[in-house]
Image (spheres, rainbow, N blue to C red):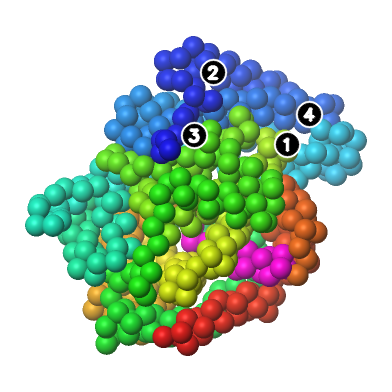
Amino acid sequence: MDMRWSLDALYTSFDSAECQEDLKKLDQDMSMLKVWSQENLQNEDNAVSKMETYITMLTSVLQTQSRLYHYAELVASVDAKNEKALQMIERIQDKAVELVEPGVQFQKWLGSLANLDSLIASSKLLEEHRFFLTETAEKSKYLLSEKEEVVLAKMKNTGSNAWSKLQELLTSTLLVDMTVDGEAKQLPLPVVRNMAYEKDAAVRKTAYEAELAAYKKIEESSAACLNGIKGEVITTAKLRGYESPLDKTLKDSRMDRETLEAMLTAMRESLPVFHKYYRKKAELLGHDNGLPFYDLFAPVGEANMRFTYQEARDFIVKHFGSFSDKLAQYALKAFDNKWIDAEPREGKRGGAFCSNLHVIKESRIMSNYTGSYNDVSTLAHELGHGYHGECLVEEAFLNSDYPMPIAETASILCETIIANAALQNATEEEAFAILENDLSGAGQVIVDIYSRYLFESELFKRRENGSLSVNELKEIMLQAQKEAYGDGLDHNVLHPYMWVCKPHYYYADYNFYNFPYAFGLLFAKGLYAEYLKRGDVFVEQYDQLLSVTGKMNIADVAKIMDVDVRSTDFWRSSLKLIEQDIEKFISLR
């Protein structure tokens, strides 16, 4: 099977007639929107007609911009040094600044309308975009002047956007010096990080040591990137009147602090049982002082489950079908139509992601597939993101952008489907390995995510007073790991550079990109339990839930399934399911 994606549905090349025409169209449509906004957003006359026109014009601009930008981003994600892709990304980011002025004008004008609700109710188009309009009006209070907003947007391109691109280039091109089978090699960072899942303990340890040594080559540059980005975030949050970067993140996530605290409380309560799991795993691997970091993902038991890419495809499609035909058909399209780039190679970024391309009603998935069960689970996870996008293709473009916490729901539900399917077909030894893999993933999403939340909270606190050195960043990371992992990990063998290899810290628009994963896992676990009770009726409600995630706040989305996300008991009930699996794991050995 072909393990590289095709992007031809977007453009065949940067020089293609379609790409060049869209660049011209973007220029023209942006200019028209800018002129129209200056001429028409000066009074409340014909407010309904003006809102309709603005939505229509903005949608056209954003669809063209999305197509161009995603194409360049996808090309760069698998070819970090592609000059045309990097130039296009910078060009689109520069062009996006032109949307700031009309955007600010519209938002302030919208916020000034006293009878917004009744105006929206008088138009079918506006009613369809009710959430977009009311949320835009609500956020108008955090706007600066038009000139200030334009200046900030322009400075961002030479500030946080530039720092982010530098960090991605550093990690995508970093080669790790490592001896493999007696031969000195230079390997891409993602390849070395994937060795954490190898059966051979010596390989895992050697890879971990080589990885940490390699980060010394880019630690100062990475620290500069992180300080630059977080410094900008603090400054802009203050200027806009947010209490803190976390306050802004919660508002952008359509989530309230009550929900976050309810979830974090339940997570903190569950940490001791996760520590038991890590100590048990350490014991199985022959460690006395807790688990060394390099064995965090070590396979346990005798099972060595391997899947060719074709086998992974067939397994995922078959078992997605046990949930719903629509999910299975989506996965089949993704594999067979070359929507997935799964081959690890130099210049390709690490990890995995999914880009939902609403403008062409498709998605693209990137992973680094090496054949492990974990890689199959990762593919299922990213296909879940893609399926979320599939459920949104008939929604208006402006209603297709959902907040971070809800973004992990479909992906983790798909992981759960695959894990349960694998368990049904597994030998006793394989079942033990699958259970451990599932717990390892849950530990990452609860325990490690909590450590990242602690790290980022402390990082923002200290960054208020100035830039942090490499040593300070390492110190904060180690302290966060000790607090979250407790005696489950060997405190002498942690990972002080997790702030370098996790790209989430380097997104200026997505701070605290950690707790959404925990939300997604626990929300999905709770939903899966409901699926087991409700069966086919659940599937229809679930698809409806995914389809409205771009036009509701999180609490209201959850209510579709009769879930109260502000209740600590809901989060405890989901964590209880994981705790039961941990007790089962401990009892099996």
Amino acid under label 1?
Glu
How much space separates mark 2 and mark 4, taking CA atoms? Answer: 23 Å
Main secondary structure along the magenta-highlighted residues: helix
Q: What's the residue at 46%, 49% (across, down)? A: 311
Determine which of the numbered discs, if any, sits on residue 338 in the image: 3
Amino acid under label 4?
Glu
221 vs 437: above or below: above
Earlier sequence position, callout 1 versus callout 4:
4
Q: Mark 2 sits on what residue?
A: 22
239 vs 6: above or below: below
Q: Nearer the viewer, mark 2 or mark 4?
A: 2
Q: What's the residue at 49%, 18% (across, down)? A: 19
Range of magenta residues = 512-532
Q: What's the residue at 86%, 34% (across, down)? A: 124
Q: Mark 1 sits on what residue?
A: 394
How much space separates mark 2 and mark 3, taking CA atoms? Answer: 24 Å
Q: Nearer the viewer, mark 2 or mark 3?
A: 3
Determine which of the numbered discs, if any, sits on residue 52 in the image: 4
Earlier sequence position, callout 2 versus callout 3:
2
